[in-house]
Amino acid sequence: METKQTGPIGRPRGFDTDEALERAMLVFWEHGYEGASLANLTGAMGISTTSMYAAFGNKEGLFRKALERYTEGPSAYLTRALEEPTAHGVATAILAGTIRTTTRPAQPHGCMGVQGALTVSDSGREVRDLLVAWRNNSYSSVHERFQRAVDEGDLPPEADPGLLARYVTTLAFGIAVQAASGVDRAELQEMTDAALHNWPLS
């Protein structure tokens, strides 16, 4: 009798790691780390628990890979925003990207990096710390860009790049929380416009 070929033990033929990771990212994005059960994850990924462990190690390992995918995909607007020629353009692009990403109809609302592990048990502490570092890295990148803006004269010399970076990233994270609560794109944009109205200019 002919037997159907399979890949590595526990991994069914046709297992697509990239596609499975995309689906896992969406589950974590919608439900958070602890809210995403193994049944939900493996069901969305279309694989067995054995295959999930074989490919990603464990749930935390899967989350780390999903966060990398989120950073390089839906959250990549931050990297692009930092390339804007002015600090005001950077801030505008960051907040516009946040609104766009957190309110898309076909995706979970909110931000995976903000809500993924705000409340977790002791077993999820490493994931919580991972997301704290992820958010701090965003702040540091914006801080460095605004410091360059001061050095180049785009921002006035009395401007505090650290404070401005905290202001913009706090707004962005707040937008994500409001989007997850159902606040619509138009209202978030109005708030953003008001927040940037008094941006310091050189």
Image (tube, rainbow, N blue to C red):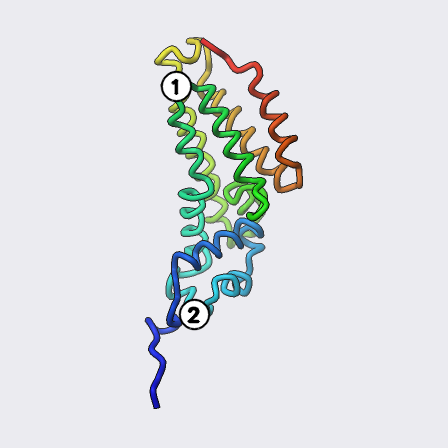
Residue topped by disc 1: 147
In this view, 58 is above or below 68? below
Residue 58, horizontal then vertical, whole percent: 43, 60
In this view, 199 is above or below 186? above
Near mark 1 (Cα within 10 A), the count class, few <14, some 14-19 or many ≥20, is many
CA distance separating discs 1 and 2: 48 Å
Residue 187, horizontal then vertical, whole percent: 65, 30
Going by the numbered disc 2, the residue's amino acid type is Thr
- Identity of the residue drawn at 46% across and 49% down: 126
Residue topped by disc 2: 50
* Dot 1 or dot 2, earlier in sequence: 2
Left/right placement of residue 44 relative to residue 61 reads right
Left/right placement of residue 96 relative to residue 62 reads right
Going by the numbered disc 1, the residue's amino acid type is Gln
Left/right placement of residue 8 relative to residue 187 reads left
The picture quadrant where one finds residue 5 is bottom left
Quadrant where the C terminus sits is top left
- Identity of the residue drawn at 53% across and 54% down: 27
- Mark 2 element type: helix
Near mark 2 (Cα within 10 A), the count class, few <14, some 14-19 or many ≥20, is some
